[in-house]
Amino acid sequence: MKIIQRLNFLLAQYPLLYQKILQKRKQANFEKLLFLSVIQRGDIVIDAGANRGYYTTLFSHIVGHSGQVHGFEPVPLTFKLLTQTLQNEQVFANVIPNNCALGDQAGEAVLYLPDQDDGQASMRQGHQTGSWKTVQQVQAYTCILKTLDHYCQNWPRLDFMKCDVEGAELLVIKGGSETIQKHRPMIYVELFFDWTKAFDYHPLDLLAQLMDWGYQQFYICNGQFVQLLKDPVAYFQEPPQESINLLCTIPECHGDRTAHLDQICTEVV
């Protein structure tokens, strides 16, 4: 493990200290600050869309030997990079990497990769953003598809879930309806209309589903700020033109954790 990787691990053992150090930087990573604020030692975490494992590793460091991180990355070459990251940086034997995708039903799915950009791999084609705008070559990969409900059956709990799957977020949520309603985890999800419309849904459809299950408090997070949404329905009525990362919480379940966000939350919108 390199010095910087070792330092990141040591700091993750002291989340409050790590937060203070990050906040003093001129360009603090507020996404990392958010994770350090709400994820705790011993948590069970789902990382859907683990990619190369940057945040998978951070989650592993935070939850420690008494926690678990279940990472999902369906693209074979990216999954190989994920496992290499874990081999190089993982300290606790607490990560279960899965070379498959999550969806609303079990079976198989095709992943499309534009110009080797593994951060833009999607189960749909024809997007008008990122690498898809200028794509020259698209590679297709057939992958195993699982549901969260089947994967998590008989689990005692699920504390936190990150879902960044390039438009298929609602499919993952629907495939985990029983698990989510039973365990009520905090959910960190990416919403981008250009992605979701390819899957025939609006960001408000996902929001409505979660609100129906009791999720009532939502925070926007990007690399530079965290904001509490006063009226999430109005905010997404006209979908933002950029990708939005949304932390979805249930106040009576997660209030003690979101209280830490007050230190980094810039404003209510």
Image (tube, grey):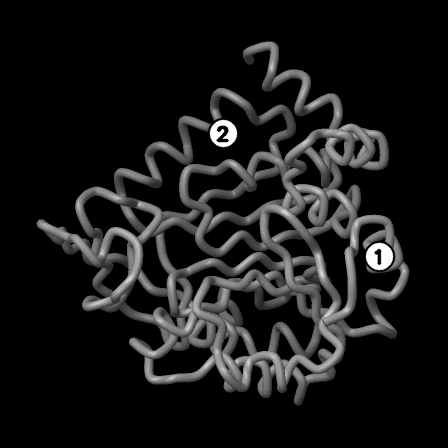
Q: Is residue 210 left or right of residue 144?
A: right
Q: Position of residue 220 (x, y in %)?
A: 65, 63
Crowding at mark 1 (Cα within 10 Å: few <14, some 14-19, many 20+): some
Q: Residue at x 53, y 72 (%)?
A: 149
Q: Residue at x 55, y 41 (%)?
A: 56
Towards the viewer: 85 or 11:
11
Q: Is residue 30 left or right of residue 84?
A: right
The reply to whether the C-beta atoms of the residues labelled 2 and 1 are less than 8 Å apart is no
The residue tagged 2 is 86
Q: Is residue 85 left or right of residue 245?
A: left
The residue tagged 1 is 257
Q: Residue at x 17, y 45 (%)?
A: 115
Give, as a three-letter code, the residue at label 1: Arg
Give the mark nearest the N terminus, 2 or 1: 2
| Image position of 252 with respect to 102: above or below | below
Q: Nearer the viewer, mark 2 or mark 1?
A: 1
Q: Position of residue 107 (x, y in %)?
A: 29, 70
Q: Position of residue 240 (x, y in %)?
A: 49, 72
Towards the viewer: 268 or 1:
268
Q: Position of residue 80 (x, y in %)?
A: 33, 34
Towards the viewer: 62 or 129:
129
Give, as a three-letter code, the residue at label 2: Leu
Q: CA distance from mark 2 to mark 1?
A: 27 Å
Report the disc number at residue 269. none
Crowding at mark 2 (Cα within 10 Å: few <14, some 14-19, many 20+): many
Task: Describe the element under mark 2 as helix, strand or loop.
Answer: helix
